[in-house]
Amino acid sequence: MSDSQFSQDTDDDDFGGYVKIDRYNQERVDSLKDNYHNVLTQIGEDASREGLLKTPERVAKAMLYLTHGYELNAEEILNSAKFKEDYSQMVVVKDIEVYSMCEHHMLPFFGKAHVAYIPNGHVVGLSKIPRVVDVFARRLQVQERLTNEIRDCIQQTLNPIGVGVVIECRHLCMSMRGVQKQNSVTTTSAFTGEFLKEKTRTEFLNLISSKLS
């Protein structure tokens, strides 16, 4: 999309002198805004009352941000900081914050991702691993697919000796509705290569469960 399709938005909230500016595709904002206005009316609200006047636009912009992963390419992110390096031990990035939305009810799920890989001639800038997690998390998701997509992207792009991914999340579709279980945590995992071996997998699980001194 060209820059002419985007508009700048200055956040209404007061952040003590900090002005937050976001860029949005105005056509998409307007289309979503109309839909959310209709939603408010359908659930029995008065969309014209003061507290809701700007709600459809705010929600439209929030939804575009929460799903901006569709606009990003995770492989390009990894390739932008891919370096030749003679290192063949496990690299672990743990406690990566995850915020995503369940595709079944469009309610949030959130938690932590732990990612490891064993280089095979190439390493990647450490900040790129959390960015890859975010690319796939910022889409409508199920946790199982999210776990596999992170694993597959790293495996296909870096061609390491193995990849390990563990994600632990709380799902608001379980705690706010349905079974309403407040403290349940869902854990998913996905492995390739050396991580399919019990010894390597155990080392990874021990590392992500340990605390720094």
Image (cartoon, rainbow, N blue to C red):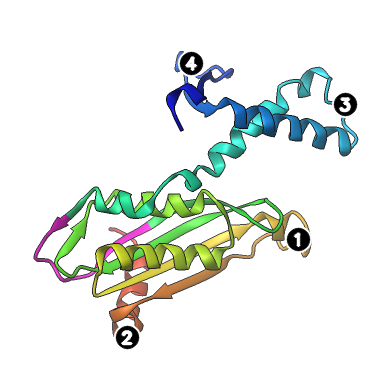
Q: Magenta stretch containing residue 135, yes or no?
A: no
Horizontally, residue 111 falls left or right of residue 132, namely: right
| Residue 157, visible in the rendered structure | yes
Cα distance in 3D space between marks 1 and 4? 38 Å
Taking the image as shown, residue 137 lies to the left or right of residue 140, namely: left
**N-term mark: 1 or 4:** 4
Which residue is at the front of the view, 95 or 142? 142
Q: Can you say whether 69 is above or below 64 in the image?
A: below
Disc 3/disc 1 C-alpha distance (Å)? 29 Å
The 10 Å Cα crowd at callout 1, few under 14, some 14 to 19, many 20 or more, is few
Q: Residues within 10 Å of mark 3 (few under 14, many from 20)?
A: some
Query: Which secondary structure, mark 4?
Result: loop
Please provide percent x and percent y for residue 182.
Answer: 69, 59
Mark 3 or mark 1: whose residue is earlier in sequence: 3
Residue that mark 3 sits on: 46
* Vertical arrangement, residue 16 with respect to residue 33, above or below: above
Q: Amino acid at mark 3?
A: Asp
In the picture of the structure, the residue carrying the numbered disc 4 is: 16
Question: Label for residue 180?
Answer: 1
In space, the residues marked 3 and 2 are separated at their CA atoms by 59 Å
- Residue 92 is covered by the magenta coloring: yes
Q: Which residues are magenta?
A: 83-94
